[in-house]
Image (spheres, rainbow, N blue to C red):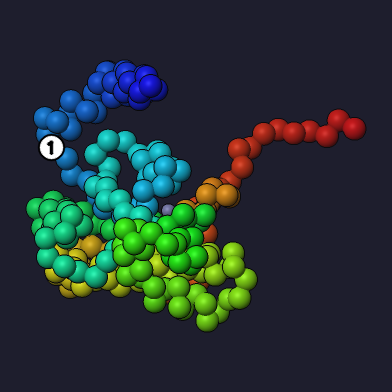
Amino acid sequence: MTQDLIKGLEAFKRDQYSDAGENLMPRLVKEGQSPKYFIISCIDSRSNPSTIFRTQPGSFFAHKAMGAIVRPYKQGTALSAALQFALNHNNVKQIIVLGHTNCGAIQALVENLDDPEISSFINVVKDALTKAQTCCNEHNKIIARTEQEVVLESVENLKNYPSVKQALQEKRVTISPWIFDMEEGNLLEHNTNSNEFEIISTNEPIKEDHKNHA
Ligand SMILES: [Zn+2]
């Protein structure tokens, strides 16, 4: 049943524990890690940062939560401890909140899913839904807008985590509000000037010499 995972590991080992892969993993184990990024992403299996950004081992610390939601600060949570480790005991330069389109968690929030175990987690960003409802009427537009507002609210919550607050004051870190558009394969970032999420990936097509022989 787990053969696909084991086959994946074997391929990974061939790549990263070999001269062809410059023995990256043995080097990282020996020399230690120093990731530049801390990526907070959804648990969604299609929006996994290491897959979509095709990163090498040692590239980023990862934190996952439904909807990439960052709850208001509370001491001793998984996220606050991880941020403390990344910012105060490592040298992370950039925190990324990576939401994504077609997010089941956001859909659950908008549609008021009747499951207390889930709703008690996602309802913490209900303000984001309220904001989205003031600008849109159509259901799909409300969901898309809520995805964006949740990322922005998560970024605001992040700023109250002591390790983040301190790193921001000392200009050691920046925070990027991003959304992965799963349908188009684009990456969007919130632009503070336009107050819109705008595409930042180039997404250029592979150039091929298509000559018209007609
Ligand atoms: Zn999601």
Locate residue 113: give its quadrant: bottom left
Residue 171: x and y in percent read 20, 68
Q: Give the position of the N terminus as an image quadrant.
A: top left
Residue shown at the point (83%, 34%) measured from the top left: 212
Locate residue 165: give its quadrant: bottom left
Residue shown at the point (39%, 76%) measured from the top left: 127
Please, is residue 134 above or below residue 81 in the view? below
Please, is residue 21 above or below residue 86 in the view? above
Left or right, 162 with respect to 200, comes to left
Element marked by disc 1: loop
Residue 174: x and y in percent read 28, 64
Please, is residue 103 above or below residue 24 in the view? below
Left or right, 17 with respect to 7, comes to left
Mark 1 neighbour class, 10 Å CA radius: few under 14, some 14 to 19, many 20 or more: few
Left or right, 163 with respect to 184, comes to left
Q: Nearer the viewer, residue 58 or 112?
A: 112
Left or right, 126 with respect to 140, comes to left
Residue 7: x and y in percent read 36, 19
Locate residue 160: give its quadrant: bottom left
Outermost residue, bottom side: 134
Q: Is residue 68 visible?
A: no
Residue 139: x and y in percent read 59, 68
Q: Give the position of the C terminus as an image quadrant.
A: top right
Is label 1's Cβ within 8 Å of ligand 1?
no
Q: Nearer the viewer, residue 45 or 110?
A: 110
Circle 1: residue type: Gly
Outermost residue, right side: 214
Q: Is residue 131 visible?
A: yes
Residue shown at the point (12%, 34%) measured from the top left: 31
Residue shown at the point (37%, 52%) measured from the top left: 42
> Which residue is tagged 1?
32
How many numbered dots are placed on residues in this image? 1
